[in-house]
Amino acid sequence: MLWQRVLTALVLIPLVVAGILYLDTPTLALVLGSMVLVGAYEMARLAQLRGVAPQLAFVIAVAVLLWLAYRFVTPSLVIASQWVMALWWMLMTAALVTRRRELLKVEAMRPTILLLGGLVLVTAWVAITRLHGGGTHGPALLLFLFVLIWVADTGAYFSGRAFGRRKLSPFVSPGKTWAGVAGAIVGGLLSGLFLSASGLAGELPMLPWVMLCVLVVAVSIGGDLWESRLKREAGVKDSGQLLPGHGGMLDRIDSLLAAAPVFALGANLLGAAA
């Protein structure tokens, strides 16, 4: 229900903003890591991993990967992983938008989804934590990434409800429309223009920055569609019941999982994350 979504957002948004602006990077990494591990538990269930013990084993495996990534992954490996994930998310977004076949429920355990899910969770967490710790403007850029996703989601929701007729990907997520995409893109455009003109994150070139914001919004929609596909194939409506009005942790961060590596890569290429 809308009032539940609004109430949950009113509680969570100030906490997220305060965490990004006032926590140091190691502490923020720990907090966000705990959220990722909740997402890992939900991912294990979507991958039809049966039983509490195997599900917890997957969570522990993801936790180990987070620790290894934090301690040992070099900046060059981070950039390489972001290139790979950016390409993967762009291809996945295109594939899901153009899909015109019914999705069937899958009963068997899905090792591929476990591997992809772990990769998506870890690379997004690495992108977010490295962005936060990446120089003077790191926290401001990370906060902007969150705001960009929130603005895009809000624009998509209200424009979709007001003008939505033509379905975006009816076999993956019947509720999403091209009007919603337009609202999200407009939100991304306005957000990019604001950040570039405001100087809050330093001097940023307007046109490339706005183009990056549009691309990030587009792949964030792909992240939403990918999780929708997993849920339809698992035969569930939400990834969990953790957040009233939003479902589970993955339902709340699915767009961010796709957007984070693309945004971090773009910010680095534009010299904003130095």
Image (tube, grey):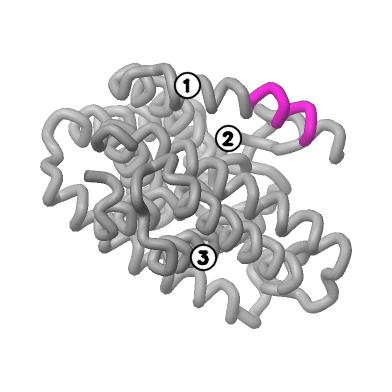
In the rendered structure, which segment of residues is drawn in magenta? 5-12
Task: Identify the mark nearer the N-term, 2 or 3.
Answer: 3
Question: Compared with residue 99, is residue 218 higher up or lower down, i.e. above or below?
Answer: above
Q: Which mark is residue 249?
A: 2
Of 31 and 113, nearer the camera is 31
Prevalent SS, magenta region: helix
| Residue drawn 36% across the image and 39% down it | 128
**Which residue is identified by label 1?**
19
| Residue drawn 23% across the image and 28% down it | 67
- The residue carrying pointer 1 sits among few (fewer than 14), some (14 to 19) or many (20 or more) residues within 10 Å by Cα, namely some
Judge from the rendering whether residue 271 lies leftward or rightward of residue 263; answer left or right. Answer: left
Judge from the rendering whether residue 164 lies leftward or rightward of residue 257; answer left or right. Answer: right
Circle 1: residue type = Gly
**Which residue is identified by label 3?**
214
Circle 2: residue type = Met
Indicate the secondary structure of the residue bearing disc 1.
helix
Residue 134 in magenta stretch: no
